[in-house]
Amino acid sequence: MKILYGTTNLAKLESMRKTLRELDIEVIGLNSITIKSDYIDETGNNPLENARIKALEYYKKVKMPVFSCDSGLYIRGIKEEQQPGVYVRRVNGKELTDEEMIEYYGEIARENGGQVFARYENAICLVLDEEHIYEYQGNEISSDEFIIVDKPHPRRNQGFPLESLSVEKNSKKYYLDMDRKEKGDKIGDGFRNFFKKCLLGYKD
């Protein structure tokens, strides 16, 4: 089955392809299709609302199976007005570059003694057709709590800038210095299980 992933972020597209490669799914991105406009105004108050808005709008445009994901970043102990939530990359109305994100969140860590504890809350909405719409937000596809530090790792993972500031809570290692076994694949397992359940018995 061919499914459109509603994103132009090539790093996210490749990551999801790797996650779902054991399933009989061909994941394509917005860059692979002709679409009048890929801009969608994400007006939701939480990751699931935004994932739903994007998936339904893209389905209307392309009339093929489509899914969208969204994330919210929640930082322990900071002021409510500083809480990024669903606006991880957008600050004061401006869309930040990867390097600007590293500087901005590094500064939040500096203002709080050099580190803050955070977690990602992730959501997905899958639209197979008008009668088969599935969505989920919860622990199975969300991150465990981790540390954002003020000193960035010298390496960059394009499309995932905050990995340069992210440290595993127990080992105190940068995620960029950890191998796949050390990191585990809790989120990947969650997404795979979601698709397996949704596609069980479905015929396109």
Image (cartoon, helix red, strand yellow):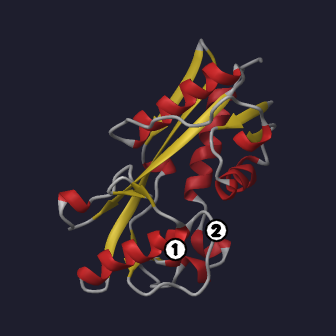
Q: Residue at x 72, y 20 (%)?
A: 202
Q: Residue at x 51, y 74 (%)?
A: 99
| Above/below status of 100 relative to 58 | below
Quadrant of res 125: top right
Work out which quarter of the rendered image holds the N terminus and state it: top right
Establish if 79 lies above or below 57: below
Position of residue 17 in the picture relative to residue 71 (left or right): right
- Mark number for residue 136? none
Please name whichever residue, 15 or 38, is drawn nearer the observer in this view of the structure: 38
Identify residue type, mark 1.
Glu
Q: Position of residue 153 (x, y in %)?
A: 53, 85
Is 44 placed left or right of 21 in the picture?
left
Q: Which residue is mark 1?
A: 99
In this rendering, position of residue 87 left or right of residue 66: left
- Classify mark 1: helix, strand or loop: helix
Helix or strand or loop: what does disc 2 sit on? loop
Looking at marks 1 and 2 on the same chain, the residue that comes earlier in the sequence is marked by: 1
Residue 141, above or below 128: below
Q: Looking at the image, do the residues carrying marks 1 and 2 touch, with CB atoms under 8 Å apart? A: no
Label 2 belongs to which residue? 158
The image shows residue 18 at horizontal and vertical percentages of 74, 54
In the picture, which quadrant includes the C terminus? top right
Residue 64 x %, y %: 72, 23
Q: Residue 175: where, in percent of width, then height?
A: 55, 77
